[in-house]
Amino acid sequence: MRRILFLFLAILIMPAYAAGAEFSVHEAVRHYIEANATWPPETIRVNFLTEEPDLSDQKKTLTLRVEPAGYYDFIGNTSFLVRFYEDATLLRTETVRTRIEVRRNMVVASKALPAGTILTEGDLLKTKKWVHRINTHAIATMKDAIGKRLTRQIQPGMEIVDNMLREVPLIKKGKPVKVIYHTDLMKIVTVALPEEDGSAGAIIKLRNLSSNKIIYGRVVSDSIVELNI
């Protein structure tokens, strides 16, 4: 099992290089990253935090084997082990530290926006930025933000993420709405008083003004709720 794991980690085995030939350990690590990362190679930027290892004292033909020094996601500060072999004999191991950045699409503010702003297309821009970590609250498209309310003030160019957004309720608590119930054979319309706010598609609690009973319905618009039975 241990041998299988080693072979899995050492996915990329670099070709042998003759002593004195010009080659870069950094380039070997970069090649490994681009070959194994889930990101497309053109969206990856590798910054090396350690200097190129000095191989001037090596007099033999070498094979380089690159493997990760631990678990990681090919982004952020990561380390790699570069092992130097002569045939099957391990000659030395170097640790190469890197910072991997990924260029990704993100939605940002086009201008300074105060808390409470209900976002429109003009408030947003779609751009690409280099990042060394992926925000788990990132949104994919401007549609994910348009029509929602900001919970905090943001500056131009700041990324819009889902935990700074709130749905804008279409239905307001205490404001009468039409409640519609329909089947293939009939349609019933009545008036009810919402007992809570509700955004599009939400199931909310209402009080039927005719019967004074509590009912539940799905918000369709700012004045219509479909009865949920």
Image (cartoon, rainbow, N blue to C red):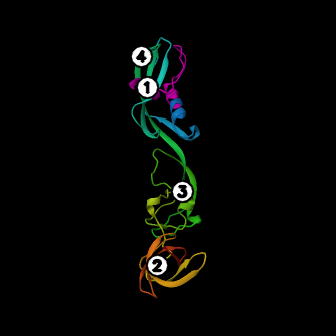
- Asked if residue 89 shows in the view, the reply is yes
- Nearest to viewer (mark 4 / mark 2): 2
Residue that sits furthest to the right in the current view: 184
Q: Disc 4 marks which residue? A: 90
**Three-letter code for the amino acid on which mark 4 is drawn:** Leu
How far apart marks 3 and 4 lie (CA) works out to: 48 Å
- Identify the mark nearer the N-term, 1 or 2: 1
- Identify the mark nearer the N-term, 4 or 1: 1
How far apart marks 1 and 3 lie (CA) works out to: 42 Å
Is there a contact, CB below 8 Å, between mark 4 and mark 1? no
How far apart marks 3 and 2 lie (CA) works out to: 29 Å
Residue that sits furthest to the top in the current view: 59
Query: In the displayed structure, would residue 76 be above or below residue 28?
Result: below
- Identify the mark nearer the N-term, 3 or 2: 3
Q: Which residues are magenta?
A: 1-30
- Identify the mark nearer the N-term, 1 or 3: 1
Q: Report the front residue among 30 and 6.
A: 6
